[in-house]
Amino acid sequence: MTKRIVFGAALALVVVGLMAPNASAICGNSKSVSTYNPSTFAYSYWHTTLSGPGTTLVAKIWQPGGPDVTGTCNTRNNANGDRGILYFSLAGPQEIGLSVNLADGCVGGTAATCANGQLAVMATVNQGGKTEFLTTQAAETPAGGTVFDFSTFGNHPLVAIPRPRVLNQSKAGNIYTANVALDAANAGAYEGTSGLITGYNILSKLSDTDPGRLATAYDTPQGPTINSSGGAGVASAPLTVDCTGTAAQGRRWIVTQLVTANGPSPTVSEATQFACGGSLAEPPGGKYKIVPKPKVAPNSKKAN
């Protein structure tokens, strides 16, 4: 218990700056949101398998059935000194914490009212072309040490956003038609939030290099939207890919964007490539099978 209290005190020093309210048009009074409770010293963290240079944390927060209140302080990259809703915990480089005050001036987005009753969070971690996520929610407890208290929910693991799998494709000129499948995403939904996931958007971008993990880097209009209530079960949809105007080495990068009833995730999955100018998309698993050339016996007729 002593160790937990000492760690909690150190953690309080890390998050105190994120909890201080500023003037806000939507929450005039302090409304703390955190995985640490300073009254009880309880804390939780979320575990990711991703770490190293370029690791970026991106969050989305909203009131289920009400406004999205994410605002502009939802991204954190320690190398850039960003201040964000999520932070790297003192527990280790792969442990993520949550701390924000809804009365902060950078929170709110286009919401007209302050979130109340219930608050949902989508946390994503991006690094090295990969993305992991979780969703969770907490009820409002005005009398508690933290108003939206995530401190007692446990040390949840984040999971990968399902990467698009190209099952088959056909080609007519520069237009490719494919069938794209996605695996279930509900393993990353905690505290009853699987019902907040409504499906997936399939996004793509024509580029010689991977556009990255931010949804804004991909084309609009987007590809198809796949309905998948709760993100449970495999889903699929046809996809048309236009490779017009690219050199033979060009690529169409296809990614998955999670969709909730309060809008899509700001980040996307690991990308699958279409080889424009070629005849095949990157296969499921990301590896092509190389068939070796048959060996010829030294004294055979084919060897002479």
Image (spheres, rainbow, N blue to C red):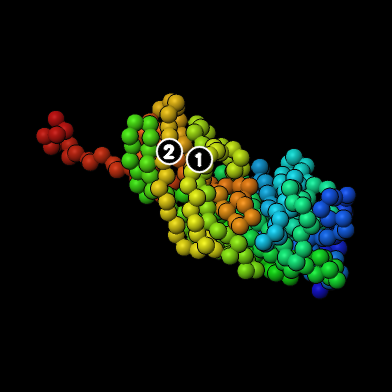
Give the quadrant of residue 44.
bottom right
Q: What residue type is labelled 1?
A: Ser
Give the quadrant of residue 91.
bottom right
Q: In which quarter of the image is the N terminus?
A: bottom right
Question: Which residue extends farthest left?
Answer: 301
Give 83 or 206, whichever is nearer the viewer: 206
What distance separates the C-alpha of mark 2 from that of mark 1? 8 Å
Which residue is disc 2 drawn over? 241
Residue at x 57%, y 54% (from the top left corner): 259
Does dot 1 land on a helix, a strand or a loop?
strand
Question: Which residue extends farthest front?
Answer: 112
Give the quadrant of residue 46.
bottom right
Q: In which quarter of the image is the C terminus?
A: top left
> Residue 133: image x %, image y %?
61, 56
In the rendered view, tell whether residue 298 sits above or below residue 60.
Answer: above
The answer to whether residue 95 shows anywhere in this view is no
Give 155 or 181, whichever is nearer the viewer: 181
The answer to whether residue 183 shows anywhere in this view is yes
In the rendered view, tell whether residue 71 sits above or below residue 232.
Answer: above
> Residue 227: image x %, image y %?
49, 56
Crowding near the residue tagged with mark 2, few <14, some 14–19, many ≥20 C-alpha atoms within 10 Å = many
In the rendered view, tell whether residue 41 sits above or below residue 215.
Answer: below
Q: Which amino acid does label 2 sit on?
A: Val
Crowding near the residue tagged with mark 1, few <14, some 14–19, many ≥20 C-alpha atoms within 10 Å = many
> Residue 179: image x %, image y %?
38, 48
Question: Which residue extends farthest bottom?
Answer: 1
Which residue is disc 1 drawn over? 204
Number of numbered callouts drawn: 2
Give 113 or 303, whichever is nearer the viewer: 113
> Residue 257: image x %, image y %?
55, 49
